[in-house]
């Protein structure tokens, strides 16, 4: 990434990445609490994920748009998971998904603000 917003976007993406890595542990702990086998390493999460990561040469705008799409994909999946948890009478997992929906909605909002208000993205 480069351009007038390099520092601001770099810090924003770093913050989002840190928060995302923290969520992996939340879900792993929930899986273990329910008696399952959790994924044990970040590389396994990456291998099993269909979320897209930024590629070299992408513009700041493209990176933000891709990150927004990833957040939207996760929000939709978490909403589906909440329905499954409800039918399985699992309020603990429902709460976990609800909290993480809020996190992803906030991150998506921050990213969308850049698309709507920063003409510097195209510089």
Image: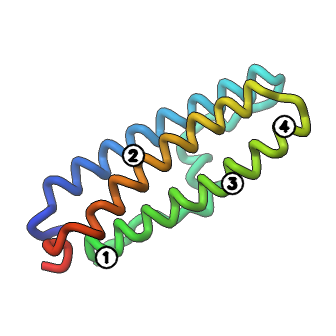
Pick out the residue farthest to the left: 4
Label 4 residue SS:
helix
Around disc 2, counting alpha carbons within 10 Å, would you say few (fewer than 14), some (14 to 19), or many (20 or more)?
few
- Residue at image location 83% in from the left, 28% down from the top: 90
Q: Earlier in the sequence, mark 4 or mark 2?
A: 2
Give residue 8's position: percent from left, percent from top: 17, 53
Around disc 1, counting alpha carbons within 10 Å, would you say few (fewer than 14), some (14 to 19), or many (20 or more)?
few
Q: CA distance from mark 4 to mark 3?
A: 14 Å
Q: In this picture, is 65 found above or below 24?
A: below
Around disc 3, counting alpha carbons within 10 Å, would you say few (fewer than 14), some (14 to 19), or many (20 or more)?
few
Q: CA distance from mark 3 to mark 2?
A: 19 Å
Pick out the residue farthest to the top: 33
Give residue 72's position: percent from left, percent from top: 55, 60
Q: CA distance from mark 1 to mark 4?
A: 40 Å
- The residue beneath circle 3 is 77
Do labels 4 and 3 touch, CB within 8 Å? no
- Residue at image location 43% in from the left, 55% down from the top: 108
Q: Which mark is residue 58?
A: 1
Around disc 4, counting alpha carbons within 10 Å, would you say few (fewer than 14), some (14 to 19), or many (20 or more)?
few
Q: Earlier in the sequence, mark 1 or mark 3?
A: 1
Q: CA distance from mark 4 to mark 2?
A: 29 Å
- The residue beneath circle 2 is 17
Q: Quadrant of residue 48?
A: bottom right
């Amino acid at each position: 990434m480069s351009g007038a917003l390099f520092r601001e976007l770099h810090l924003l993406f770093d913050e989002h990445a840190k928060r995302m890595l923290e969520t992996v542990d939340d879900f792993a702990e929930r899986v273990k609490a329910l008696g399952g086998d959790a994924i044990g390493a970040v590389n396994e999460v990456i291998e099993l994920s269909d979320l897209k990561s930024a590629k070299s040469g992408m513009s700041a705008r493209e990176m933000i748009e891709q990150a927004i799409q990833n957040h939207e994909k996760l929000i939709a999946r978490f909403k589906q998971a909440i329905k499954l948890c409800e039918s399985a009478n699992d309020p603990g997992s429902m709460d976990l998904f609800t909290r993480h929906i809020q996190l992803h909605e906030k991150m998506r909002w921050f990213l969308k603000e850049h698309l709507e208000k920063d003409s510097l993205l195209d510089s």
